Amino acid sequence: MLALGPAVRGDVDLDWPKVLELTAITPLSGELVCQELPDGESLCLIGLTPDMSHGRDRAGLFELVRRAPPDSLRIVIGHSPDFLMDLAGAVRIDLALAGHTHGGQVVLPWVGAPFTKSRLGPRYASGLNDYKGVPIHVSAGIGMERGTAPQIRFLCPPEISVLEVAY
């Protein structure tokens, strides 16, 4: 089993990446790391900048993803899930990972999250979903939106996601 610990920068991470210096976590910001797997295949983790993940640097986003070898397994990690609106159907991605939505913070029965701060909409507030043929996991995370949203969580418990990727 391959164990990797990548992290991407969020919107308010002022101490990035200094806080990760003494950990086994690899900060990725506008860069990728590739590792050969035991069966000879290659896995590339592609870490986006905040601008790439929010859709404000499309050229940089495409250039970065296209640097991954074409036959590699590609996992794209961004703070906001909005990057998938640009990439899905345009380049091959095997898995997308994101956060940013905080699961909506407030989830209403039979309605879901009425607000997510993502252009993807409430269906992608948290959990594993499919967006135009690309599997995406959005973590609800442990924090809350700062500034523009109330500091509450309702029917949206904090979470730390641990994903085991089988290939």
Image (cartoon, helix red, strand yellow):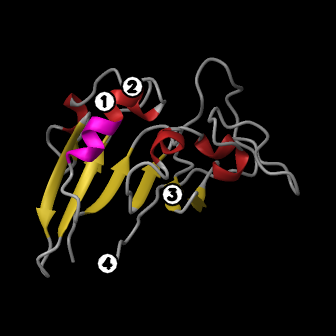
The one nearer the camera, 55 or 15, is: 55
Q: Position of residue 48 (x, y in %)?
A: 33, 37
Question: In this rendering, which labeled residue sits more in front, label 4 or label 3?
Answer: 4
Q: Which residue is mark 4?
A: 167
Locate residue 165: give its quadrant. Answer: bottom left
Direction from residue 67 to residue 147 in the image, left or right: right
SS at circle 4: loop
Amino acid carrying label 3: it is His
In the rendered image, which quarter contains the N terminus?
Answer: bottom left
Q: Position of residue 32 (x, y in %)?
A: 20, 45
SS at circle 3: strand
Looking at the rendered structure, which numbered label has been put on residue 111? none
Q: Which residue is mark 2?
A: 57
Amino acid carrying label 1: it is Gly
Q: Earlier in the sequence, mark 4 or mark 3?
A: 3
Q: Which residue is mark 1?
A: 60
The one nearer the camera, 32 or 107, is: 32
